[in-house]
Image (tube, grey):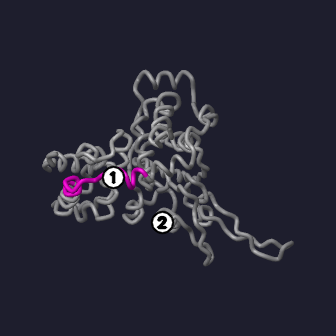
Amino acid sequence: MTEHPRTAVLQVINTLAEDYLQGKIKAIKMAMISLLSGGHLLLEDIPGLGKTTLALALSRALGLSFGRVQCTSDLLPSDITGLSIFDRNENRFDFIRGPVFNNLLLADEINRAMPKTQSALLEAMEERRVTVEGTTYNLPEPFMVIATQNPVEQVGTYPLPESQLDRFMITTDIGYPPEAIEKVIIQSGSIRDGIRDIEPLITREQLLAARHVVRTEVHLSEKITDYIYLLANTTRNHHMLIAGVSTRGAISLAETARAYAFLEERDYVIPEDVKALFIPTCAHRLIMRSENEALDRKELLRSLLDDTPVPLA
């Protein structure tokens, strides 16, 4: 009997959470939901909490090729996509592929890159391809960007524009580990070396099969669709917002809810799946009015969840 692709996916999550990234189960699940939904992940948290370690551990456990870009103000688009170099011996230009040509690309401190460089990722994230000097190159499948940014530091940063933020399926944080786990980490030191020894726990075929199951076999009922629309439409009419959740955002909420149901070992979506992903999927898409800019977007969405009637089965 063939093993269901869900089994291998759950093994990846459980192994990482128990053996390598203790106390980070939420971030691991959000990363996996993004990948299963065909989207990208933005990690917002202060330095030193394991954002880079999470990306590296995920790529190792999934058997995916890994590329990293350390974003700085002098980073050029070609540093991400690659460039053509003239070969004098062959009398021709050869295209040298950049780090974007990996299954998983870590864009570290993305808000330190200049807007022109940030925009170099837009085509890759949306179209799964890049165009360099008039030639279009397809990216590997699966392809996922995990970007990180420090939400506190403002000096030398360039805030991500709405068009860039909208390309991220989910935004979440890492958070501090529980006290007991953090004390163990402090005593034993960095776990980065152990991460590099992780063997793949799933094949590429199993991962793509899991994505296919999420997309085609997890049922989204009409009532759940109505619930997602109601939540999105409520944000569009909120007096504190210039713009609420777009149609793209509502689609993302439906896709991530399907992936969440898949991880919960169900082939149908329930309201709790939508509620669990509403804030991670939608908070970063809101555009606040200037007088309300200091307000917490997550708290606003939390209040909308409480006030919006949940459909009955």
Residue beneath the point at 39% across and 55% down: 215
Q: Circle 1 sits on which residue?
A: 281
Q: In terms of depth relative to the viewer, which is nearer, 25 or 75?
A: 25
**Residue 48 in sight from this viewpoint:** no
Q: What amino acid does circle 1 point to? A: Thr
The span shown in magenta is 213-227
Mark sitting earlier along the chain (1/2): 2
Query: How many neighbours does mark 1 have within 10 angstroms: few (below 14), some (14-19), or many (20 or more)?
Result: many
Judged from the image, the secondary structure of the residue bearing numbered disc 2 is helix
Residue beneath the point at 57% across and 23% down: 188
Q: In terms of depth relative to the viewer, which is nearer, 223 or 275?
A: 223
Circle on res. 122: 2
Q: What amino acid does circle 2 point to? A: Leu
Determine the CA span between mark 1 and mark 2.
18 Å
- Left or right of 56 on screen, residue 154: left
Task: From the top left corner, tell me how far across and down residue 27 is, in percent.
Answer: 42, 40
Task: From the top left corner, tell me how far across and down residue 150 is, in percent.
Answer: 44, 48
Q: Are marks 1 and 2 in contact (CB under 8 Å)?
A: no
- The answer to if 222 sits in the magenta stretch is yes
Residue beneath the point at 38% across and 55% down: 216
- The answer to if 311 sits in the magenta stretch is no
The quadrant of the image that shows the C terminus is top left
Judged from the image, the secondary structure of the residue bearing numbered disc 1 is helix
Q: In terms of depth relative to the viewer, which is nearer, 185 or 9?
A: 9
- With respect to residue 265, does 293 lie above or below? below
Residue beneath the point at 52% across and 60% down: 113
